[in-house]
Amino acid sequence: MITVRNLVKTIRHEAHTVEIIRDITFEIPDRQFTAIMGPSGSGKSTLLGLMAGLDWPTSGQIEIDGVDITQLNEDQMAALRGRKLGFVFQAYHLVPTLTAIENVMLPMEMLGDERDGAFPRAEHLLKSVGLHDRSAHYPTQLSGGEQQRVALARAFMMRPSILFADEPTGNLDSTNGKHVLELLWELNKTEGTTLILVTHDETLASRADRRIVLSDGRIVLDARDSQ
Ligand code: ADP
Ligand code: MG
């Protein structure tokens, strides 16, 4: 369960203070698939970064399973991230000197456990994003969409209980976008992963349990799928 309470993020820009997130409050129950939508500049990426503990709010609380992450130090936050959070960013952040499969295995290598299981799991994930024949390629040898799919496979590697993704299908053509959506959907249904996705994609949003729409740093619509 994620609880966001009276969240505010302001940024000093030259002479003035800009309010990017303006007093946002909501809860996300476990296993929910939420789409965060809204026009460009409305604060979607900022909100996602705050919820994932990658950025600090100006005020307000964010609780993940009862722990207020705004009170954690860097080490405590890193431990929580490694244990239960996964991310897919708009920029892929792949390690250029590692192959696709090595990039996917990286989170597990860094924790140093379950190494024997790492290779087959990474292979399985690359296959499920349609890249089994690209596993030995380096990021520069992959297209933008392929890099995005490697990043997605890497985010799934540790079986996160919460996955945050910023426009995960934004750079993909419709076939690959569909692949990724199916993968996210499957993860949500079979592994019970809580999904919080920023998206402009109507197809993706229509599969979500809920959509939260932001405008100018505020929630202007919070709708649950009635189906
Ligand atoms: P979205 O993801 O919905 O497009 P963002 O969360 O990226 O929106 O940004 C929300 C607003 O905050 C935008 O107007 C953006 O220009 C501004 N903003 C974001 N980060 C910064 C920053 N580091 N410094 C100044 N303004 C920022
Ligand atoms: Mg954004």
Image (cartoon, grey):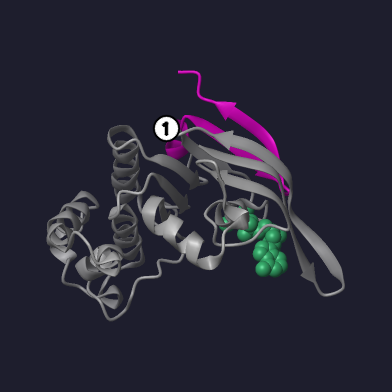
Query: Is 205 contained in the magenta span?
Result: yes
| Picture quadrant where residue 58 is located | bottom right
Inspect the image, locate mark 1, and give the three-letter code of the amino acid beneath it.
Arg
Q: Nearer the viewer, residue 169 or 54?
A: 54
Residue found 45% across the figure and 52% down from its top: 165
Mark 1 packing: few (<14 Cα in 10 Å), some, or many (20+)?
some
Q: Is residue 39 visible?
A: yes
Residue 151 as seen in the image, left or right of residue 226: left
Q: Is residue 194 above or below residue 13?
A: above
Q: Which stretch appears magenta?
A: 203-227
Query: Is 36 contained in the magenta span?
Result: no
Quadrant containing ligand 1 reads bottom right
Residue found 37% across the figure and 40% down from its top: 193
| Picture quadrant where residue 113 is located | bottom left
Q: Which residue is mark 1?
A: 207
User: Residue 198: x percent and y percent?
Assistant: 52, 48
